[in-house]
Amino acid sequence: MYRFEIHRELPALDASGESGRGGSVPVARTGLLCRSESRTGKIVAMLGVMVPLSLGPLRGEVDWEQPITFERAYQIALAGNPITALLTAKLEAADGRLEQAGLKPNPRVAGEVENFLGSGPYSGLDQTEVTLGLSLVIERGRKRQRREELAVRSKDLLQWDYEEAVMDLRYNLRRAFSHALIAQQNVVLQEELLELSRESEIEVERLAEAARSSAIELSHARLATRGQVFQLESAQRELTEKRAALAAHWGGPNPDEFELQGELTLASDLPPFESLREQLVRTPALGRYQAEKAVQEASVELAQARAHEDVEVFAGARYFNQSGGNGALVFGIEIPWQLRDRNQGNIKSALAGLRVVESRQELMRRKLEGRLRVAYQQLGSALEERTSLETDLLPSAEEMLGETLEGYRNGLINYLGVLEARKTLFEIRIAMLDTTRRYLEAENTLEHLTRPSGHSDIDPKQHHEQK
């Protein structure tokens, strides 16, 4: 990886070209520090496969005096996010459904009195018959096992829901963090330009007093300073907005001011697109469809099992009052006659639902592949633009500024030319910052699309078991 770090030099050149603070026109020069790092086996990790942190919730108060890195911001977001509590409640509900699915039908106690309070010989209680018994539904087709299997498969889907929720949190947080970091760097850049504008105004005032600069040039210098004050205030307002957007992921009371710490890095090359595309099948967005398919297959099996009607058996004792209190055992069985309803409609619906899952999986695969291709192109474009700005336009702008300063010292160019050359240089630096922002957005999208499952920073199953 090549790391690009923008730093500043504020040399002051006197009339002879020597460095000094007095009698000078300030110049902003952008130094570019390039350090090469080994990228063997790391490019995929940078773009999608990152080591899980196993951070868990933060304990105690957050020390806002310390700089906020992305991983620290991620810890704070996880600690204050209700995702885990929500999943715990869903797991408990799933456990309840699983427990209920494994229960056998309850037996039923029945009583029956016949031949009393009628007419003739049945007017009294002499002919009364009393039957007491117990009935039980016997499930056929292994319905209970099918219900349990469906409940287990449905519970497995919660893990995928959790991983997707955590990955979405990471994606949105990283996007907000990079925007805030870019805005913070832009404030530094605007402060640098304001400092140069003020020093330039002082220098032009000195030259105007010595009759070496016109009043028009002095007016332009003062206007440039006031314009830069506005640009700095605008950049500070944008930073406040980006900080607020970042803090919104943390929940609870957050400070208005905090320092962000991070590196605006760009890779020197890109991995092959095919290697990224192959990772899509291991992501929660696509991997969850295997679990959904298992759920639907369990639904098909349960629907097919329900095609076998249950049998109800009855056993009990009967008391005959008219025979001097004699008794007898009673046994019965009820078998539904499946003349019309064989649950064929539900079976057909469940089989169609299986095809629906397969179709949705293919649609999602194409959608993700399309987003991946767009993000990959955006990443490559941002890298090419940044490289062009850094290797071509930036040196040319620095060279032009140097030549303009030399012409100004020799009286060949007025100060407006110096302002324009310096403005061009800073516009290139701001453009470099903008391409960095676009690169980080595309990189974040690639990580979000290709990050494999199993990287959640809190294991919901373990959390549920510990509770």
Image (spheres, rainbow, N blue to C red):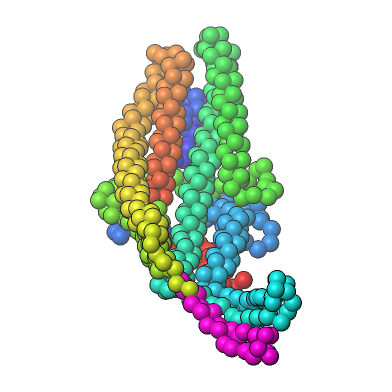
- 10 or 340: nearer the eye? 340
Q: Is residue 223 left or right of residue 415?
A: right
**In the rendered image of this protein, does residue 209 appear above or below residue 169?**
above
Residue sitting at 54 percent across and 19 percent down?
224
| Residue at 32% in and 49% down | 359
* x, y percent for residue 316: 59, 84
The picture places residue 131, in percent across and down from the top left corner, at 63, 81
| Majority secondary structure of magenta residues | strand
Please tell me which residue is depicted at 43% across the width and 34% down the height of the picture.
434
Q: Nearer the viewer, residue 103 or 35?
A: 103
Residue 376 position, x and y percent, is 32, 43
Residue 88 left/right relative to 14: right
* In front of the other: 142 or 334: 334
Q: Is residue 442 visible?
A: yes
Query: Splitting the image into 4 quarters, where does residue 125 fall?
Result: bottom right
Q: Is residue 151 magenta?
A: no
Q: Residue furthest right?
A: 124
Residue 320 lies in the magenta-colored region = yes
Query: Is any atom of residue 31 visible in this view?
Result: no
Tell me residue 411's x, y (percent): 42, 14
Which quarter of the figure has residue 117?
bottom right
Q: Name the residue at 44% across, 19% down.
A: 420
Image quadrant occupied by the C terminus:
bottom right
Does residue 452 lie above or below 106 as drawn?
Answer: above
Which quadrant of the figure has residue 284? bottom left
Q: Which residues are magenta?
A: 310-333
41 shown above or below 335: above
Image position of 207 with respect to 241: above or below: above
